[in-house]
Image (cartoon, rainbow, N blue to C red):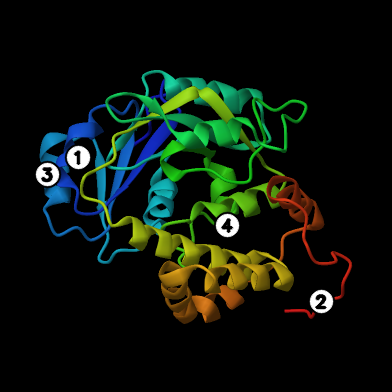
Amino acid sequence: MGAPDPQHRVTVVVATRNRREELVAHLGRHEGPVVVVDNASTDGSADAVRAAHPHVLVVELPRNVGAVARTVGVRLARTPYVAFADDDSWWAPGALARAAAVFDAHPRLGLIAGSIAVGPEERPDPLNAVLAASALGIPTGSPGPALLGFVGCGAIVRRSAFLAAGGFDDVVRFPGEEERLALDLFDAGWRLSYVPEIRAHHHPSPHRGSDERRQTGLVRSRLLTALMRRPLRAVARELGATLRGGRPGRRGLLGALPRVPAALRERHRVSPTTEAALALLHGPDPTDPAAPEESL
């Protein structure tokens, strides 16, 4: 990728797999430089993008690495800020320029979560209201409510902060990859803010996995993220919730088990400050927070 147009300060990174039609249809909606990272598609996605959008940088991966594909794209970006999009989503006109201005005005801002409009009807994603009502409030000097979570296709990051936090990792992968990154950004002192005037459009692809499969993946990711970053009592609570979660819980646990050694290698607990923020968002720890805990 050559030097970016100085007018464009945000690169859009699109991770994709086997959604050629949606990918090609929506790529023209993006403003600024675009990097498409193809997760070993078998439907000719990469060639179709090169033919229809020759200005787009296409990276073909030899295997499906899930959300790590976004990290590959961020490393290739040459702009200070990077927006994520799925093959069935795009950013509203002017949204990326507004995001760059917000980042410029807030040097400790590491991530912007934008609002998401769903489908041709432009329905507000239910998550918008959740983010707007964050129990962390709006800290002094922040552009919006503080967060400890986000949705990938509705997020724009400061490239340096994202890479310093390790990007999306190969332990969690997808779905639910956002939680560990949010924890690490917050723990490093970066702010994550909901800025609703920066809007993304999402027209969910009909070529999606089942709801149960997604739920299974989220259970797996929550377990692995807890093991990587949370106290053991939090891991135990997550495990208990998993065992009570019926078939998705059982399948999620089975899916997590092969990745436990990798999660333990990457384990380091977030700070008490971050744990306190989690308690504000999710309620107090039902166990004694002062209780001694084995080290790991």
Circle 3 or circle 4, nearest the eye:
4
* Badge 4 amino acid: Arg
Q: Where's the C terminus, which quadrant? A: bottom right
On screen, residue 224 versus residue 70, left or right, reads right
N-terminal label among 1 and 4: 1
> Gap between marks 3 and 2, in whole Å?
54 Å
* Badge 1 amino acid: Glu
Vertical placement of residue 177 versus 254, above or below: above
The residue indicated by pointer 2 is 293
Is residue 80 visible in this depiction of the protein?
Answer: no
> Which numbered dot is residue 200?
none
Q: Position of residue 127 (x, y in %)?
A: 50, 37
Identify the secondary structure beneath mark 1.
helix
> Gap between marks 2 and 4, in whole Å?
22 Å
In this rendered view, identify the residue nearer to me: 268 or 101. 268
Quarter assignment of residue 292? bottom right
* Badge 2 amino acid: Glu
The residue indicated by pointer 3 is 48
On screen, residue 245 versus residue 135, left or right, reads left
On screen, residue 99 versus residue 22, left or right, reads right
The residue indicated by pointer 1 is 22
In this rendered view, identify the residue nearer to me: 210 or 143. 210
Question: Pointers 3 and 2 in contact (CB under 8 A)?
Answer: no
Vertical placement of residue 52 versus 283, above or below: above
> Gap between marks 2 and 1, in whole Å?
49 Å
Identify the secondary structure beneath mark 4.
helix
Tell me which residue sits at (19%, 58%) in the image: 41
N-terminal label among 2 and 4: 4
Circle 3 or circle 2, nearest the eye:
2
N-terminal label among 3 and 2: 3
